[in-house]
């Protein structure tokens, strides 16, 4: 490929690469009454570019960095906006849209789960706490996919991965379709904006350390009693489930004795409903059983024989199984009530934490409402204690509304006047419904009353305190230790660390969210001993760190002190952010406004470095890609390779010096490097021309192509020209990029029986055109280098 070289000093080349790849900063700071911080304006600019280029994006900034107002400001660009959010955040979103001067509809995930919500089409769909939409097999996902069909999609979640990378792929599939399942880590990361707190050093965000353990005690006999529970009688449409029942009871016991007692009460109610049905000769399904068992104390009166419930032929045998299980549950319930001292010990540990943090606000989180209410009962007469669950809030004096409880606990975050001393709440015990989207940065202490099943949930909990605008410099974190015997059975920490590793490979993960192996000040665990008493003995309880297991990938070079540098694994999203950070630095090193190269012109330069390599900017249609190579290796756009080359770059302090004569002596190096980049560009152009990026990955697409081919093959001679034209358009529409909603609609269209083949082809063409697919898509874009920096050892 013929090129015209324009030689330039390395700083000028780097500045040009930075300007073209990351774009010029121009976003206004003020939107409505809200002033966006620099990192928020940067996110807004990047979101706009990603939406233009790929139709969607995931804003996965760390908890507390202000994603809500970034998305709300973006909504100003669109006419028809839909926000999907947890029920508890709907009011917040209405306020945020109003504050930035945007309009839009807000619907909850719960509404969509019931099949409700709007039916019209939208231009922009914002999913707040998007991890709630990570399960494709649910009604909720189907409704969201339907609403996102034909719209730009922005996903907001600091914790999109709760179990595996499939969580992330399922979210991106809302606008990428099945292609998302086939993307590698680098390709997924191109759809993600992920900044950590260290990336915004100008903002005051509290630091934190690994959670310190709060040891409570154990009851081995109670665990043995749980494991000995006779198997339950399952509903008509369920398997045996005996192991899962026991596993669930152990999980609740690991949270609190009260959670175990509550679960056992609900099992007795369930058994009562089953017994009533069996007396009528029927065995209900899970759904029918749920309608009869009202709560953990009562069973709704039902007449199975009047409902559409099949007659059970072996009801007598099933009654024996049910009776045995019910007797076991009653005996276990009696035994569990005798172990109530463990919840008193948990409450005492919270009192000890309050004493260590006198005058500070503390928020304590749990998965289970029974746990929250039990700890509150133990502490209700302690000054300044409140509980908040789905049923509302309470203090010693009685019930409060959710908003009033939050305002008394976090008046500064709520923007209200501080309450009177007698109304002040200093310890808020809450379920995880408060762990998402709520500003509680008046609190400087977070306590995990139990360990949830995902590290994402732990990060969300701590994130309520570590937010923009917090006045405290450090958030102290504690984790209530589950009974050792339950931990051995469930392996909670091992599961958390495995999931954290999966998150780290894609997004990066902070190992500090899990209990760690060192104290924040370097002291030994024995130096933080707390005492707790049980009825049987006085046991030495401690705030102690957990075993020192590596929590997964960490970041590099300019990250937190004490972390590894060279050779450390870095997540795909983190590599992308580190490259962007370097480019922003290059752009700031010079005031150059070098013009964009003309067609077939390449700006080139050379630089001394500790290792040979190259860094090049390649134009692909209207987009740009960074490619790199180390030594004589292959050129590629893998972010690991690009980051390796970026780390070798050192911008000269004298950017204005005329180095053309020196550069000319390196022209042979430049020509050799360009030849390697040209070969990569040719391969990339071949991939794009072959349409590999749009290869059908769903059965519906493959069936559509087969049907199109069959119609074209049997077209009558006098209609062959028109049908060939329609078939070509239909093929384009069948392979065009769609989100999950359109792919599901395509499945129905493929199976549609129409009167004529021609009508079906037109229907398929209209299907694509209505979803912004062009009837005459452009040919594969040209791929050509525009700037290159050669690193010479």
Image (cartoon, rainbow, N blue to C red):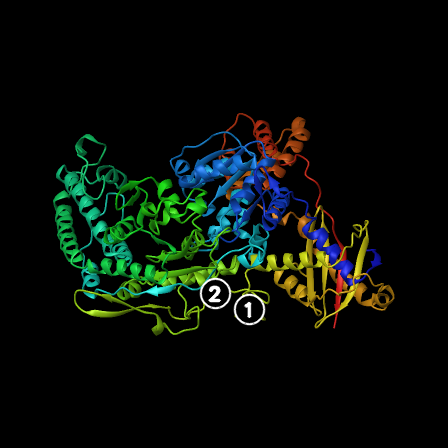
Q: Residue at x 27, y 43 (%)?
A: 237
Of residue 147 and residue 235, the one placed in the foreground of this image is 147
Image position of 404 (left or right of 279): right
How many residues crowd mark 1 within 10 Å: few (<14), some (14–19), many (20+)?
few
Disc 2 designates what residue? 552
Split into 4 quadrants, where in the image is the C terminus?
A: bottom right
Disc 2 on helix, strand or loop?
loop
Q: Is residue 792 above or below residue 730?
A: below
Res 702 label: none
Residue lying furthest right:
661
Q: Residue at x 71, y 69 (%)?
A: 632
Rendered location of residue 82, percent (x, y): 51, 35
Res 568 label: 1
Of residue 83 and residue 30, the one placed in the foreground of this image is 30
Which quarter of the figure has residue 350?
bottom left
How many residues crowd mark 2 within 10 Å: few (<14), some (14–19), many (20+)?
many
Image position of 749 (left or right of 665): left
Split into 4 quadrants, where in the image is the N terminus?
A: bottom right
Image position of 148 (left or right of 162): right
Which quarter of the figure has residue 342?
bottom left
Rendered location of residue 593, percent (x, y): 78, 52
């Amino acid at each position: 490929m013929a090129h015209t070289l324009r030689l330039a000093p390395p700083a000028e080349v780097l500045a040009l690469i930075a300007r073209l790849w990351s774009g010029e900063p121009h976003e206004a700071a003020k939107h409505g009454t809200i002033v966006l911080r620099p990192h928020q304006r940067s996110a807004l600019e990047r979101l706009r570019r990603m939406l233009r280029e790929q139709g969607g994006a995931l804003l996965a900034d760390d908890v507390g960095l202000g994603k809500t107002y970034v998305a709300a400001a973006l909504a100003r660009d669109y006419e028809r906006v839909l926000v999907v959010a947890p029920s508890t955040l709907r009011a917040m979103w209405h306020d945020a849209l109003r504050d930035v001067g945007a309009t839009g509809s807000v619907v909850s995930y719960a509404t969509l789960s019931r099949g409700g919500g709007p039916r019209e089409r939208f231009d922009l769909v914002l999913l707040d706490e998007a991890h709630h939409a990570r399960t494709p097999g649910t009604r909720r996902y189907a409704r969201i996919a339907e609403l996102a069909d034909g719209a730009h999609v922005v996903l907001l979640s600091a914790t999109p991965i709760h179990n595996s990378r499939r969580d992330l792929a399922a979210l991106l599939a809302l606008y990428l379709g099945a292609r998302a399942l086939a993307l590698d880590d680098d390709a997924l990361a191109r759809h993600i904006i992920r900044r950590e707190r260290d990336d915004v050093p100008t903002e005051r965000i509290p630091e934190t350390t690994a959670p310190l353990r709060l040891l409570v005690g154990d009851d081995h006999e109670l665990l043995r009693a749980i494991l000995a529970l006779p198997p339950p009688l399952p509903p008509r449409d369920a398997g045996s489930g005996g192991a899962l029942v026991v596993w669930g009871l152990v999980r609740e016991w690991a949270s609190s004795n009260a959670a175990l007692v509550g679960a056992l009460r609900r099992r007795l109610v369930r058994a009562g409903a089953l017994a009533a049905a069996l007396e009528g000769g029927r065995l209900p399904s899970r759904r029918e059983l749920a309608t009869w068992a009202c709560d953990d104390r009562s069973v709704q009166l039902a007449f199975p024989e009047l409902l559409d419930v099949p007659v059970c032929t072996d009801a007598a045998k099933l009654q024996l199984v049910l009776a045995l299980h019910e007797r076991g549950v009653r005996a276990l319930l009696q035994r569990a009530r005798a172990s109530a001292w463990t919840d008193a010990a948990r409450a005492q540990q919270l009192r000890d934490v309050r004493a260590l943090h006198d005058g500070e606000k503390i928020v304590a989180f749990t998965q289970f409402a029974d746990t929250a209410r039990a700890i509150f009962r133990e502490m209700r007469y302690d000054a300044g204690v409140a509980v908040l669950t789905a049923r509302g809030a309470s203090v010693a004096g009685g019930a409060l509304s959710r908003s009033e409880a939050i305002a008394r606990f976090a008046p500064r975050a709520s923007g209200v006047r501080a309450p009177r001393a007698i109304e002040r709440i200093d310890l808020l015990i809450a379920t995880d419904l408060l762990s998402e989207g709520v500003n509680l940065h008046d609190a400087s202490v977070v306590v995990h009353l139990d360990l949830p099943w995902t590290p994402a949930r732990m990060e969300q909990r701590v994130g309520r305190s570590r937010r923009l605008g917090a006045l405290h410099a450090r958030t102290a974190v504690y984790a209530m230790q589950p009974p050792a015997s339950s931990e051995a059975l469930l392996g909670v920490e091992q599961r958390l660390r495995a999931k954290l590793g999966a998150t780290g490979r894609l997004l990066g993960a902070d190992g500090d969210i899990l209990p760690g192996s060192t104290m924040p000040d370097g002291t030994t665990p024995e130096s933080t001993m707390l005492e707790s008493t049980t009825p049987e003995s006085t046991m030495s309880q401690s705030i102690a760190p957990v075993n020192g297991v590596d929590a997964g990938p960490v970041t590099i070079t300019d990250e937190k002190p004490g972390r590894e540098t060279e050779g450390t694994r870095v997540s795909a999203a983190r590599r992308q952010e580190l490259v962007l950070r370097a480019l922003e630095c290059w752009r700031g090193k010079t005031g150059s406004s070098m013009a964009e190269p003309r067609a077939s012109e390449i700006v080139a330069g050379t630089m001394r470095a500790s290792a040979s390599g190259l860094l090049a900017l390649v134009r692909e249609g209207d987009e740009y890609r960074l490619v790199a190579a180390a030594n004589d290796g292959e050129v590629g756009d893998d972010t690991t390779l690009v980051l390796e080359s970026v780390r070798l770059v050192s911008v000269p302090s004298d950017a204005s010096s005329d180095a053309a004569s020196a550069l000319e002596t390196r022209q042979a190096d430049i020509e050799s490097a360009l030849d390697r980049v040209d070969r990569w560009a040719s391969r990339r152009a071949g991939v794009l021309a072959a349409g590999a990026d749009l290869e059908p990955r769903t059965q519906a697409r493959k069936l559509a192509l087969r049907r199109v081919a069959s119609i074209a093959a049997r077209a009558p001679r006098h209609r062959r020209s028109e049908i060939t034209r329609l078939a070509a358009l239909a093929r384009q529409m069948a392979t065009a990029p769609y989100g999950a909603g359109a792919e599901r609609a395509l499945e129905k269209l493929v199976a549609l029986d129409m009167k004529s083949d021609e009508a079906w082809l037109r229907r398929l063409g209209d299907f694509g055109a209505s979803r912004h697919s062009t009837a005459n898509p452009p040919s594969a874009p040209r791929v050509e280098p525009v700037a290159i920096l050669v690193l010479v050892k």
